[in-house]
Amino acid sequence: MALLEQLAELLQRDPSDRRERARWHLLDWFACAVGARDSALAHALARLAAPDGTTESLSVIGPMRSPEEALRVNSALGNVLEMDDVHRTSILHPGPVVVPAALAAAIEGRASLDGFLDAIVRGFDAVIRVGRALDAEHYRFFHTTSTAGAFGAASAAGSLFGLDTPALAQALALAGTRTGGLWQVRHGGMGKSWHNALAAESGLAAARWARVGVTGPLAVLEGPQGLFAATCSAPRPERLIEDAPWWIDDVSFKPWPACRHAHATIDAALLVRAAMAQRSPTQIRTVEIASYGDALTFCNRAEPQNEAEAKFSLQHCAAVVLALGLPEALHFRQPFLRDRRVAALRAATTTRRDGNFDAAYPEHYGARVEVELHSGERLFATVRDALGDPANPLDSDALTAKAATLITDVGIDDRNADALIEHILAAPGELPTGDWYREALSWTH
């Protein structure tokens, strides 16, 4: 039996006991996507809208000409703020791909809320299982959210379309034949968001095609010209079908608006800042950041030139925290890139790869920040697990506060933001027409 046939069988388990968890990931995606609606990408995508757009094709920035365009917008905007959920060991972001694909399929099929939430759980499981089966060589070149994301989108859509095990396996196979996404996107442009949109769109399309009987190569993962052979040196197929609980429980929520590889550095810098008590950041002579290899590969930027680069800069993240305190979205934009206090601390910062953090990664995303004061005194802090990981979780109050901040930052008043959050977290479980998510989206316009 092909791997995808075995995966499809696993995905048919009953996920109903994970619906509450799915609501939190729905809220997190929703807040991140709505919070990005004033971004340059959102303004560009708004040009896809047509005056005669209908509520059947709702996106977080308004009615679109078709469900496909709404899906692209919803999935593209979910990662713009770099605050989307993340899974550590598969090194990918499930929410921005899986949730919009589930939303599109649910609206298309007028699904129940429970069916929608079940689809999110199944989609998360598929994308994480595929991502965990890929290896470090794959991650060197490929954006795993994109390569594994299409499988998650196909699983979520297939769940809502009621695909049986053989049909779901075909949907996964079709999705796998055109998956991809090169990491060169991190060197400029908006391609990372484009990857999310294409992964969600192709997964939904694969489920639609499989629903009417179109078939794919079931061995698209393990075959001689399959994904493993093409993109991995040491794939781990056993992880795809291992006996494990629903992987949605193992997903992290991000508290800070930066690449996840920078979060442990932010957390450690916050501890150092607290230890400095009343001493001024101007008393800092040097800053040293130690972390694992991928943190330096993706986030070692001493002189970021724009918001995207700042969010992928260990130096900027540490400097912002030491100079200003809790990092906010505005701290990664102009004029803070030119702020003299932040620039001085960036210039004083060095980075190094630490073997202990390498050995613990990717199960643990760790970092150490050490500052030397002009007086010669040294202060340091080590973080083993970034805030928001299962071993260092954000509680429900923190998650709600994050969502409220992102939603109100784009001009939605506190009362409506609270109503939206309550709507998502507490709407009844049985709504045959699924009108609640149409209503929630319409409130943002």
Image (tube, helix red, strand yellow):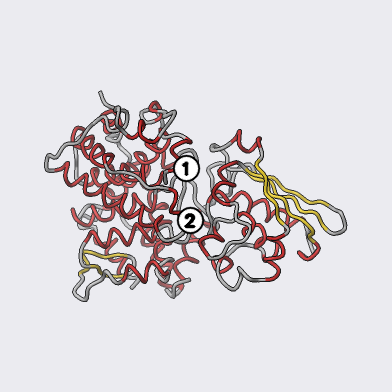
The picture quadrant where one finds residue 40 is: bottom left
> Between disc 1 and disc 2, whose residue precedes?
1
- Residue at 56% from the left image edge and 65% from the top image edge: 305
Kind of residue indicated by mark 2: His
The N terminus, quarter of image: top left
Q: Secondary structure at mark 2?
A: helix
Picture layout, residue 325 above or below residue 231: below
Please provide percent x and percent y for residue 148. Answer: 36, 42
Circle 2 sits on which residue? Answer: 187
Picture layout, residue 7 above or below residue 368: above
Please provide percent x and percent y for residue 430. Answer: 26, 52
Tag on residue 91?
A: 1
Dot 2: few (<14), some (14–19), or many (≥20) neighbours within 10 Å?
Answer: few
Please provide percent x and percent y for residue 56. Answer: 20, 64
Kind of residue indicated by mark 1: Ile
Q: Secondary structure at mark 1?
A: loop
Picture layout, residue 187 above or below residue 65: above
Q: Is residue 294 left or right of residue 191?
A: right
Please provide percent x and percent y for residue 188. Answer: 46, 59
Q: Is residue 366 left or right of residue 216?
A: right
Viewer-side residue, 116 vs 97: 97
- Residue at 27% from the left image edge and 47% from the top image edge: 203
Distance of label 1 from label 2 (alpha carbons): 19 Å
Picture layout, residue 10 above or below residue 370: above
Farthest top residue? 1
Dot 1: few (<14), some (14–19), or many (≥20) neighbours within 10 Å?
Answer: many
- Residue at 63% from the left image edge and 42% from the top image edge: 384
